[in-house]
Amino acid sequence: MYIYDKFDNTVVNERVADFRDQVRRRLSGELSEDQFRPLRLMNGLYLQLHAYMLRVAIPYGTLSAAQMKKLAHIARKYDRGYGHFTTRQNIQYNWIKLEQVPDLLGELAEVQLHGIQTSGNCIRNVTADQFAGVAGDELDDPRVISEAIRQWSTFHPEFSFLPRKFKIAVTGAARDRAAIQFHDIGIQIVRGDNGEIGYAIYAGGGMGRTPVVAPLIRGFLPKPELLSYIEAILRVYNRHGRRDNIYKARIKILVREIGAEEFTRQVEEEWALLRNEGINLPAAEEARIRKFFTPPAYEPAAKAAGEFEAQRKANPAFARWVETNVHTHKQPGYGIVTISLKPVGEIPGDATADQMDAIADLAEKYSLAEVRVTHVQNLVLPNVKQGDLFTVWQALGKIGFADANAGLIGDIIACPGLDYCALANARSIPVAQEISKRFESAERSALIGPLQIKISGCINACGHHHAGHIGILGVDRAGEELYQITLGGAGDETASVGQLLGPGFKADGIVGAVEKIVDIYLELRNPGEEFLAAYRRLGPAPFKERLYASH
Amino acid sequence: MRVIEIAVGKDLKPVSDSWSRLADDAAPKAGEKVIVPLARLKSGDNQIFAAAKVGVEITGGDAVEDLKPWIDDLGLVVLRFGTFKDGRMFTAARMLRQRLKFTGDIRAAGDFLPDQVVFMLRTGVSSLEVADEFPLEAAKRSAKAYSVRYQHAVDTQPVAYEERARLP
């Protein structure tokens, strides 16, 4: 993985010093809260319902074991012993004291972590496929260009006060595990007509109160020109994005209002001028970054394979976990392990300090000291030998993270909701907990198959409900929490926005409604047909009729 | 109000300033350095060029391209921040320098934070018009807060990848 050199370390250390001074000025009253707000947000610090919340960046979802241990330490020392992994590959701490933040950031900087641009109206932490570098289906490693984007976007002097936040995601595979079409800019590594590597560029996607699947604005961009092209997009957005209404300020609204064609024309016009202004990444720097992502020396596989087969045969629960939570590695004999942070009845994405430490130890022993964070709030051990899978599974069982539910109905995304968030209309965590309890049976969820439930506690859609096969949106109706259901959303390469099914359900009825939808699906599906495919074939009618007939 | 000169690598320096804003419809006096709004410049009112020097003030919604016909005759462009949250002026400054090749003074005015001086320096702003109570010390700190740059803008110091390339 990428290791900071003295320049990168200097940036982070100077940021800590700068923020220490800003906090001092806030505490002394020199800065008003209104003035301090954009400064603290650009460093990931929110003021929430009960306390400050700090969001720490995990660029493109990659963590070393040592960094994970530091995250555990931070949870113990500055929070209440746990942290929350988010849908943008970050971690959040919910109980932070303002006066301690400079010291906390100083400790993070020791392991090359920070909160830079994890919030605010700037270019946010860049996200990527959590299987980068280890998935068999990728054309090129998305972390190389993600790291280049991380550096280019850090303290960008022109784009630090945008109309609204700006999120970039990168995938190196045709199978989109980074939800790129729901980002302000989505980048897919593709091959050109002559087989050369370049990028397909999507722009203007997003969730929130106006969900939009991003249009493709350029089918092929030559590899050396990426930074000048995204700079052109940012410039058009910074100049022309709406600033009169916070709810219409994202780039998706600009693209929609002037049309994708006109937006693309403006970007291309700007790019024609910008591409020669020295913005593109020199080949030598690309090569320098790429070296950090050289594949490790994998061991020849076969020797443990027989044992692995025997372990699966002897232990059905292990076999089920391998089936759902272990993804094919590009290197034969290795597996990519998804650690489900969704134990039945628990808070999606939460991990205690002890759990983080245990995962860091596992990474050190069994995964070349690396951990990944996924945008569905799980963790990944990217390099586990098949012969070690059984041991890893047992160790995960000891910390309560061996649930065989990756990609299944229990693998729910939920935003913090009204339990923590100042913006929320309704609680989301308890709904997620109740659903996972209702579908507790591993046999039953295996029978149901791939099904993504995503829950947001308000229209801002941090729980990505628009992209859920089943989406749940908490709303407030005259002081009562109601939950609306959308169906048919998807955040993969077939991205679509879920359609609202009908009136909302009360807190005591939402889990039953989800169960009913699942039952209808099981009854109507063709053999082997997954939920999303079945919904796309059937449409909302059979679900709507039967759900509301008994409502 | 006072004017502060800013430049990469140099201390912020309060300077005496001889620019004045020309009242609507008024004609400049001989030897005067006047600032007019963009609309007046565009109106074709050539009497303003009787001034010793002409400056123009633009706001967030103005397009810097509109200054093109006069760019060689302008001594100053004032970028008025309606609010510190409005980042359009950073683009305006950079385009003035890089596209319009403007070499005169670019002055930030209006509502901005001392912490934004670091970005102003890098996008080509060369002076600040601030209220007397403006926290100059905080702005000085901001100007020196970061010694590494990750991307090219208007300033000419080497960026991180150029520094790396020079390492033995």
Image (cartoon, coloured by chain):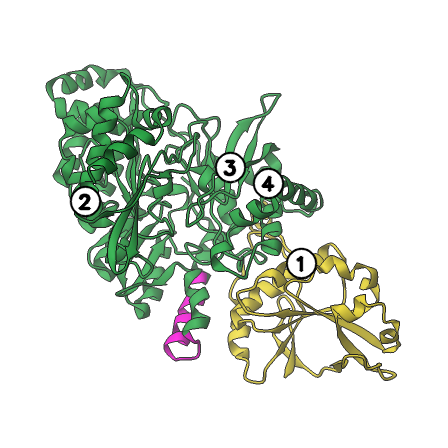
User: Given the image, on which type of amino acid does mark 3 rest?
Assistant: Ile
In the structure shown, which secondary structural element does the residue marked by tag 2 occupy? loop
Q: Position of residue A528 (x, y in %)?
A: 28, 18
Q: Along the horizontal axis of the image, is A42 left or right of B123? A: left
- Residue furthest left in the image: A314
Q: Tell me how many marks there are.
A: 4
Q: Look at the image and give the residue range highlighted in magenta.
A: A15-32
User: Given the image, on which type of amino acid does mark 4 rest?
Assistant: Ala
Judge whether A532 appears above or below A505 on screen: above
In the structure shown, which secondary structural element does the residue marked by tag 3 occupy? strand
> Pointer 4: what residue?
A260
Label 4 and label 3: CA atoms lie apart by 16 Å
Main SS of the magenta part reads: helix
- Toward the viewer: A448 or A478? A478
Q: Position of residue B156 (x, y in %)?
A: 66, 57
Q: Earlier in the sequence, mark 4 or mark 3?
A: 3
How many C-alpha atoms fall within 10 Å of the one at disc 2: few (<14), some, or many (≥20)?
few
In the structure shown, which secondary structural element does the residue marked by tag 4 occupy? helix
Q: Is residue A21 magenta?
A: yes
Label 4 and label 2: CA atoms lie apart by 41 Å
Q: Earlier in the sequence, mark 4 or mark 2?
A: 4
Q: Which chain is yellow?
A: B
Label 2 and label 3: CA atoms lie apart by 40 Å
Q: Position of residue A541 (x, y in %)?
A: 33, 30
Callout in the foreground (4, 3): 4
Residue A224 marker: none
Q: Are marks 4 and 2 on the same chain?
A: yes
